[in-house]
Amino acid sequence: MDSAEPVESVRVGVRELRANLSALLRRARLGTTVIVMSRDEAVAEIHPPAGKARPQRRLGTLKGRIRMAPDFDALPPDMLDAIENG
């Protein structure tokens, strides 16, 4: 782990979670990890989502796999006439 500030955590029972869900979610949004306890056993953790998990794009992955028709950008004569002559 890096030298960032330690993550704050708070332990709550299921009853307290139900009673204070909105407030606990606000704290989680700000970085607090909420550990939900049931009979002295951790059953869940609520924390902010990890950073965006988008896969890294690799340039050139599709090189040679995509072909454009020679007339790809050519307009049909009737459409070209409609554009040019209104």
Image (tube, rainbow, N blue to C red):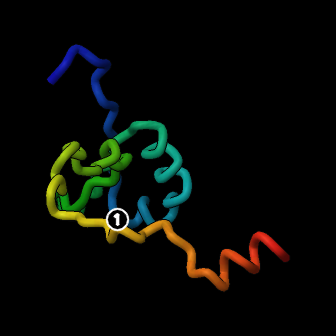
Residue at 28%, 23% (x, y): give it. 6
User: Dot 1, crowdedness within 10 Å: few (<14), some or many (≥20)?
Assistant: some
Image height check: is 38 above or below 25?
below
Residue 32: give x, y in percent of width and height: 39, 39
Total marks drawn? 1
- From the viewer's perspective, tell me whether residue 1 is left or right of residue 55: left
Q: Which residue is mark 1?
A: 14
- Please tell me which residue lies in front, 9 or 16: 9
- Please tell me which residue lies in front, 23 or 69: 69
Q: In the rendered image, which quarter contains the C terminus? A: bottom right
- From the viewer's perspective, tell me whether residue 61 is left or right of residue 20: left
- The quadrant in which residue 68 appears is bottom left
Residue 70: give x, y in percent of width and height: 35, 67
Q: Is disc 1 placed on a helix, strand or loop?
A: helix
The amino acid pointed to by label 1 is: Val
Residue at 33%, 71% (x, y): give it. 69
Q: In the rendered image, which quarter contains the N terminus? A: top left
Residue positioned most to the right: 86
- From the viewer's perspective, tell me whether residue 21 is left or right of residue 55: right
Residue 15: give x, y in percent of width and height: 40, 66
- From the viewer's perspective, tell me whether residue 80 is left or right of residue 38: right
Residue 35: give x, y in percent of width and height: 28, 50
Residue at 29%, 50% (x, y): give it. 54
Residue positioned most to the bottom: 78
Image height check: is 45 above or below 8?
below
- Please tell me which residue lies in front, 43 or 26: 26
Residue at 47%, 45% (x, y): give it. 29
